Amino acid sequence: MSITTSRRLINFISLCGFFALIFLTVYFYHLGIFDDLQSLQEFVSQKTFWAPLIFVLIQILQVVIPIIPGGISLAAGVLLFGPLEGFLYNYIGICIGSLILFWLGRQYGRPLVLRLVNEKTYYKYIHWLDNQKRFDRLFTLAIFFPIAPDDALCLMASLTKISFKKFTWIILLAKPASVFAYSLVLLYGSEHIIQFLL
């Protein structure tokens, strides 16, 4: 399968996911769930097992094959489940998705990475791979601070000599800060976050 064909397939899957989300949104709207935030939260709280599980699966999927912007799902997690549980479900889904991306990259190599990472992003960060120690430092910082395309870098990390164990520890330890900060900024705006920190 050529790179162009693979990208078209991935785009098709993303488009199908996008339309599925639109369908669910319209369906929930007709049920009156979107009348106010409390109605939505009550609906989610009734699905004590399925709602968190489905949300985590959506987060995993949107990391591996982006269907919706990650920022939207991060904010949705906090809105639906509250600050603590929302953060936890976001964190679990994003970490598992990142590990899957790295594993896929290790299994299928550069051809897969080129299929999933757009050319502009690939060539912007490819020079990071020249020096393993420098890459490890830059990669850790990029995961800790939301300053770079994490998903693309997880794939590109699979092309380096970084061990799966070290990659896992970087994801597990560095992700919480960026997930927490990004969620709060999306929900409350940067001014409230600065006031909170001060």
Image: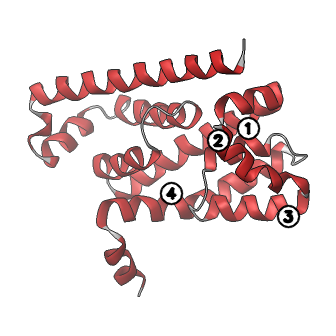
Residue 113: which quarter of the image?
A: top right
How far, Cα to Cα, is label 4 from label 2?
13 Å
- Upstream in the sequence, badge 3 or badge 1? 1
Secondary structure at numbered mark 4: helix
Viewer-proximal residue among 163 and 42:
163
The residue indicated by pointer 1 is 102
Viewer-proximal residue among 168 and 113:
113
How far, Cα to Cα, is label 4 from label 3?
24 Å
Label pair 2/1, CB-CB below 8 angstroms: yes
Residue 152: which quarter of the image?
A: top right
> Which mark identifies residue 98?
2
Viewer-proximal residue among 123 and 174:
123
Residue at image location 72% in from the left, 40% down from the top: 155
Q: Position of residue 1 (x, y in %)?
A: 72, 11
- Upstream in the sequence, badge 2 or badge 3? 2
How far, Cα to Cα, is label 2 from label 3?
20 Å
Q: With 124 as the anchor, is 19 left or right in this view? A: left
> Which mark identifies residue 179?
4
Secondary structure at numbered mark 3: helix
Q: With 111 as the anchor, is 193 left or right in this view? A: left
Residue at image location 36% in from the left, 51% down from the top: 75
- Upstream in the sequence, badge 4 or badge 3? 3
- Upstream in the sequence, badge 1 or badge 4? 1
> Which mark identifies residue 134?
3
Q: Residues within 10 Å of mark 3 (few under 14, many from 20)?
A: few
Quarter of the image with the C terminus is bottom left
Label pair 1/4, CB-CB below 8 angstroms: no
How far, Cα to Cα, is label 2 from label 1?
6 Å
Label pair 3/1, CB-CB below 8 angstroms: no
Amino acid on which disc 2 is placed: Ser
How far, Cα to Cα, is label 1 from label 4?
19 Å
